[in-house]
DNA sequence: AGCGAGCAAATTGCACACAAAGGACGATCC
DNA sequence: GGATCGTCCTTTGTGTGCAATTTGCTCGCT
């Protein structure tokens, strides 16, 4: 394990954190997967101490579930949580666009345009395209210079990947590229209202069109309660 | 500092976390204060390991600054960050009231009314009154059943205490009790628009009326650069 | 005096060791 | 045959030791 001095500007636990985060977002580790401290540490060449620290951080970010004495697993949000999450996202991203409308510098505009082009180019590769779509949103957030806003949007976008991984329709293009373009146009034009509406619609359409329940995890309780009722139980 | 076995459903690091959080919010530890792992652990009767874990959590919550090799200090947000934070809060709490408008159960209404009464009663005690005012907002968030929303509002409310501790006008009543009452009335009446506006105004008035710069920490760099220029340095 | 090298104290970074909890498996007892 | 209990094994919880880094201070040099 390369331990070249500059491993990171900072402690190695950050490196572990990033590695795991990346793995999760890439779906190399799928929701529900166990994350034993030992094996991870071994694999990454660090002690459990550091892995543990990274796991704590990830759990604070909502990417990992940490259950006492039972260890860590990749988070497995419910569909309900997913919907709520997108609601929260909408609230925050609304603030993003309101802040940005009419205030983008040329440089920022270029950055965003380039990104949209990249999204368009990568349209075929499902995985890449999801990642890029997310990045567009974090990119926007970044431009607000509002630290807490940036942090939360980043976090929610990351978690959205999990949601989509679990409940996303197989081949839907979750973030229509054209919608990003329209949004950008509104922002440039300084039409805060329009941009706001577009963003709201954009996110809303994900929950209504792209998310759908999976058979295999209709809540066990729900399933059982139906059967229970049929049998006059509970 | 009760340390009775049942400390919490969970590990003792949670207890440490809560203890520190409480201490910070009570301003027993003021912004900028050093938080050495050793002394804290000693004082709380746990090892550095647990303290460390708690500190990591607190830093994720933004209550503590964690700098590599330099240890932890109670966070010291800038005024600018403070303003942005309230902007973010407004965006989220807007969602809270929109979600809740016209949907409160009688029980919830009672809870909120009782809380407002308590706020009114404690109006004299500055510290208590700040805490209660914050709790009103977290209470509202709680009622949305939206996990991420709840988490973020809690976090932001907590951080708001820090901001107010640093930049709050000495004797301003940061959250006018009457405003909470009005807000509740609108929510009960199901007037989402009104409630939304009230909340926005409520939070906005804090930033415009209650926050003011402090002399002693005009950004050190700014201050110094002025002096440096005067002296022909840098 | 002023300045910097270098030493010493305090603190963090990290790994490891041991204790305890949870779970799997098999023996035992109705 | 099935349920229950006990034992072993795996994984987590927590304390402690040692290395590394930072910081402040002293001392000698200019």
Image: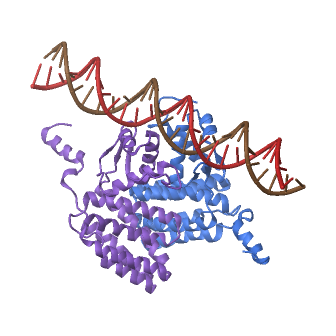
Chain colours: A blue, B purple, C red, D brown
Residue A218 in sight from this viewpoint: no
Note whether B153 is above or below B200 in the view shown.
above
In the displayed structure image, the side of residue B179 where residue A115 appears, left or right: right
In the displayed structure image, the side of residue B47 where residue A228 appears, left or right: right
- Point out residue B174 in the picture as x, y percentages from the top left corner: 28, 69
Note whether B152 is above or below A222 in the view shown.
above
Q: Which image quadrant: the N terminus of chain A?
A: top right
- Point out residue B34 in the picture as x, y percentages from the top left corner: 31, 43
**Which is more toward the observer, A46 or A148?**
A46
Residue B147 in sight from this viewpoint: yes
Q: Residue at x 32, y 78 (%)?
A: B179
Q: Residue at x 58, y 62 (%)?
A: A177
Q: Which image quadrant: the C terminus of chain A?
A: bottom right
- Point out residue B201 in the picture as x, y percentages from the top left corner: 33, 75
**Which is more toward the observer, A187 or B179?**
B179
Residue extending farthest to the bottom is: B189
**Which is more toward the observer, B220 or A12?**
A12
In the displayed structure image, the side of residue B74 where residue B56 appears, left or right: right
Q: Quadrant of residue B189?
A: bottom left
Q: Residue at x 63, y 35 (%)?
A: A43
Q: Residue at x 60, y 64 (%)?
A: A176
- Point out residue A197 in the picture as x, y percentages from the top left corner: 49, 73
């Amino acid at each position: 394990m390369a331990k070249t001095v500059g491993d990171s500007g900072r402690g190695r636990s950050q490196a572990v954190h990033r590695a795991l985060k990346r793995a999760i977002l890439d779906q190399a580790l799928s929701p529900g997967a166990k994350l034993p401290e030992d094996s991870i540490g071994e694999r990454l060449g660090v002690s459990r101490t550091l892995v543990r620290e990274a796991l704590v951080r990830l759990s604070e970010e909502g990417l990992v579930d940490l259950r006492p004495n039972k260890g860590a697993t990749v988070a497995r949000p419910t569909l309900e949580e997913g919907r709520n999450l997108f609601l929260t996202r909408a609230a925050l991203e609304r603030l993003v666009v309101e802040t940005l409308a009419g205030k983008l510098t040329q440089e920022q505009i270029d950055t965003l345009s380039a990104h949209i082009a990249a999204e368009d180019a990568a349209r075929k590769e499902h995985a890449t395209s999801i990642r890029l779509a997310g990045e567009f949103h974090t990119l926007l957030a970044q431009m607000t210079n509002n630290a807490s806003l940036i942090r939360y949007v980043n976090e929610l976008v990351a978690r959205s990947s999990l949601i989509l991984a679990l409940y996303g329709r197989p081949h839907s293009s979750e973030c229509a590229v054209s919608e990003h373009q329209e949004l950008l146009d509104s922002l440039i034009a300084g039409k805060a209202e329009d941009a706001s509406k577009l963003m709201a619609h954009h996110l809303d359409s994900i929950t209504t069109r792209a998310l759908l329940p999976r058979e295999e995890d209709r809540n066990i309780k729900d399933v059982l309660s139906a059967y229970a009722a049929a049998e006059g139980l509970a």
